[in-house]
Amino acid sequence: MKKVADRMKLPWIYHSDGNLLPILDDLLTLGMDGIANIEPNAMDINDLKKRYGNRVCLVGNIDLHYTLTQGTPEETEAEVKKRIQEVGKGGGYILASSNSLAGYCKPENVLAMHRALLKYGNY
């Protein structure tokens, strides 16, 4: 991976599921510009922001296991607002789901995420 990373000319984001904390310091030596798609139940994004936010952009953390799939639009808006307020300070955060927008996401929650991003996403 290091050989490939050293040849990268454009900014790049490392995608992984689960808990990267045991290897994150080593991973960051590859020089990526972002870490995606941070799962709420696997890693604490607020802790990541404190520890690594000056080194790498954080992507994701809107819960795919509950909020976007089983929650309400109101819960989705509240989670988006909270992430932007807590993690967006100082930049280095890209709002996204904790993995992808799967077919089993509630469309009304995806739309609520979009609307909330437009409403709260300026920092």
Image (cartoon, helix red, strand yellow):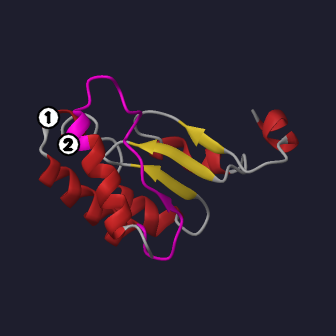
Q: Residue furthest top?
A: 103
From the viewer's perspective, is 5 left or right of 110? right
Q: Position of residue 10 (x, y in %)?
A: 79, 48
Which residue range is magenta in the image? 88-109
Q: Secondary structure at mark 1?
A: helix
Looking at the image, which is closer to me, 14 or 77?
A: 77
Circle 1 crowding by C-alpha within 10 Å: few under 14, some 14–19, many from 20: some
Marks 2 & 1, CB-CB < 8 Å contact? yes
Instruction: Please give the residue where the numbered disc 1 appears in the rendered image.
Output: 70
Is 24 included in the stretch rendered in magenta?
Answer: no
> Is 21 located above or below residue 105 in the figure?
below
> Is 105 located above or below residue 114 in the figure?
above
Q: Secondary structure at mark 2?
A: helix
Q: Residue at x 37, y 42 (%)?
A: 97
Instruction: Please give the residue where the numbered disc 2 appears in the rendered image.
Output: 67
Q: Position of residue 19 (x, y in %)?
A: 41, 39
Secondary structure mostly seen in magenta is loop
Q: Position of residue 105 (x, y in %)?
A: 26, 31
Circle 2 crowding by C-alpha within 10 Å: few under 14, some 14–19, many from 20: many
Which amino acid lies under the numbered mark 1 shown in the image of this protein? Gln
From the viewer's perspective, is 34 left or right of 70? right
Q: Which mark is residue 36?
A: none
From the viewer's perspective, is 10 left or right of 84? right
